[in-house]
Amino acid sequence: MRIYDIIVIGAGHAGCEAALAGARMGLEVAIFTMSLDTIGQMSCNPAVGGLGKSHLVKEIDALGGEMARVTDKAGIQFKVLNKSKGPAVWATRVQCDRLLYRRFMRETLQSQENLDIKEAMVRNILIENGRVLGIETSDGAYRCKALVVATGTFLNGLIHVGLESIASGRAGEPPSIELSQSLKELGFRMGRLKTGTPPRLAAKSIDFSQMGIQESDIPPPPMSLFTKEIKNPLLPCYITYTNENTHKIILDNLKLSPLYSGIIKGIGPRYCPSIEDKVVRFRDKRRHQIFLEPEGIDSDEYYANGISTSLPRDVQIKIVKSIAGLEEAEIRRFGYAIEYDFVYPQQLKPTLETKHIEGLFLAGQINGTSGYEEAAAQGLIAGINAGVRIKNKEPFLLRRDEAYIGVLIDDLVTKGTNEPYRMFTSRAEYRLLLRQDNADLRLMEKGFNLGLINKEEFNQLLEKKALIEAEIKRIRSTRVKPDVVNPVLVRLGGTPIKEDTTLYQLLKRPEVRYSDIARISAPNPNSPSLEGELAQDVIRQVEIQIKYEGYIERQVEAAERFKRIEEKEITQDFAYKGIPGLSKEIVEKLEEVRPINLGQASRIPGVTPAAILLLEIALERHRRC
Ligand code: FAD
């Protein structure tokens, strides 16, 4: 029997990244999916990125993952959100063509060396002496050294439309029942979550003239650093609203909702609620926004973002027809809710390997998250760590001050989750350091060292770094005279200067942009920083690094303090029992999570600062012994 280095179960967003990372690290990988036709399937809305999430996608990109590149190839609308706020919360959102996304992800997998793609239902995980041995599928057994399970919403999936329930992993696809049982038999503690999706509408039945319109940014801002050109036509989205009549229909039919009749037991996403939830929870709100998003260039379907629902089909028809512009709308596919099993993620190490079975990794929605981006980020980390484990190298970990991916994984394995977890910028303590614009400066070298970023790509990063440094140096040292500067300052509404000053002092003023100081004193005309896309990137960095310097420095200092406590490692067999003064309850919490360092220990819910002090003393004593 052939022994693969890594087997990945699931070809969703987590599985694809895990398989590509493993194969690109030179390992023999097989990816299993229930259907080859749904590789890279976007189960819900056809969009990637958005607030907090684009940070993850850009980090995946900088580390050598695939999501951002495929997004750009499939993108049909590109926007940077939050532009009126500070750069820490800017976020790119890309509306995709659903079929193109699948096609390009499948092509990437197909053309990847060392990667076999297999369609089969995986039924069982094979274990020997606490280590992964392989899998049993509908087509036979396969052996591997490491296994990544990335089965999304499929474990014991149950779809609800009104009071009807049907076992299913996603609309039209079977659930994964035996595999869920296999995980339970291996001793994993599992829970139940829920998510939902709205109806899709036929374009020809929509009256767009009654709606607001949202166009793409021009030029379209790509998601990936490596994209040179966006080739697809750009399509608009449309905006409409629910109204009091819509809300009345929903409230009148609540008894037919599986959510409110008690049929659904799983907890749903708090930040992405169904329309029934929104109407019940926010009774005073007179309308809720709906974005009608095109499903693709050749598709005549629109995704009704904002009215996710599991009400019966006849009620869904009434809801849709009550909305301005949708009076004649035809529903192509009805909305539904899905309940599924997940594994409580405190049972994982920060590498995403399970604590009690060696070589078994879990990634994506199975760990209690929601969203393509969260799934892809975990897939990449699980794939990398499966790889470094086989190569006997150090685990690949990202700290909270290094990446949103670090925040995501630390939150999951340290605090766990009881509801679908999604990323927000507010979850990151060091968000001024973790901007989407500097993901490459933070992470690409790590991707290069792992073999996921090639030499040419890495050299471009080095060139960009050098240009940024040189331009900041020039701006700091170039002095300019009042007679040159003041006409510009007056035009910008700023206070004139009386004595010579540096370009640096000028750029720190809120009203002054880089383009203004470049006009006052242009950089060397032969400098490559003046040309092309690189120029824009370099200019953005120069501007952000100078304008926000004080805030950034303060966060760097805070991150340094944070790092000191993260560096106090705790071995996995450390004995918490017997530490003087530590309560039984805290010992249990520490034993459950088994933190890898003092910093992680301090973030476990219920572990108090006083307990951390006791633990620190005990660690110090242990180190000296
Ligand atoms: P998935 O993309 O679900 O992929 C799972 C893969 O595992 C599939 O390829 C499947 O074939 C394979 N698989 C499963 N079991 C087996 C087996 N036994 N053998 C072989 N292959 C197997 N996210 C949001 O952020 N917002 C939303 O509003 C939202 N709504 C959603 C609504 C619905 C109805 C669904 C289904 C999902 C929704 N999501 C939403 C979640 C989003 O789709 C997921 O977060 C994301 O796709 C998870 O990626 P994943 O890689 O973990 O799993």
Image (cartoon, rainbow, N blue to C red):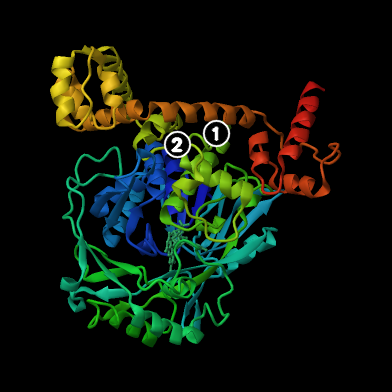
Front-lying residue, 582 or 21 = 582
- Which residue type does callout 2 highlight? Met
Q: Is mark 2 within 8 Å of ligand 1?
A: no
- Which residue type does callout 1 highlight? Lys
Which element type, helix, strand or loop, lies under badge 2?
Answer: loop
Mark with earlier residue (2, 1): 2
Between the residue at mark 2 and the residue at mark 1, the CA separation in whole angstroms equals 9 Å
Q: Is residue 621 visible?
A: yes
Q: What label sits on residue 410 in the rendered view? A: none
- Find residue 96 and report its horizontal and vertical position in percent: 28, 57
Residue at the image position 56 percent from the left and 31 percent from the top: 393
> How many other residues sit within 10 Å of disc 2, few (<14), some (14-19) or many (≥20)?
some
Q: Is mark 1 within 8 Å of ligand 1?
A: no
Front-lying residue, 33 or 2 = 33
Front-lying residue, 247 or 295 = 247
Image quadrant where one finds the C terminus: top right
Marks 1 and 2: in contact by CB < 8 Å?
yes
Residue 297's quadrant in the figure? bottom left
Q: What label sits on residue 25 in the rendered view? A: 2
Residue 33's quadrant in the figure? bottom left
Q: What label sits on residue 391 in the rendered view? A: 1
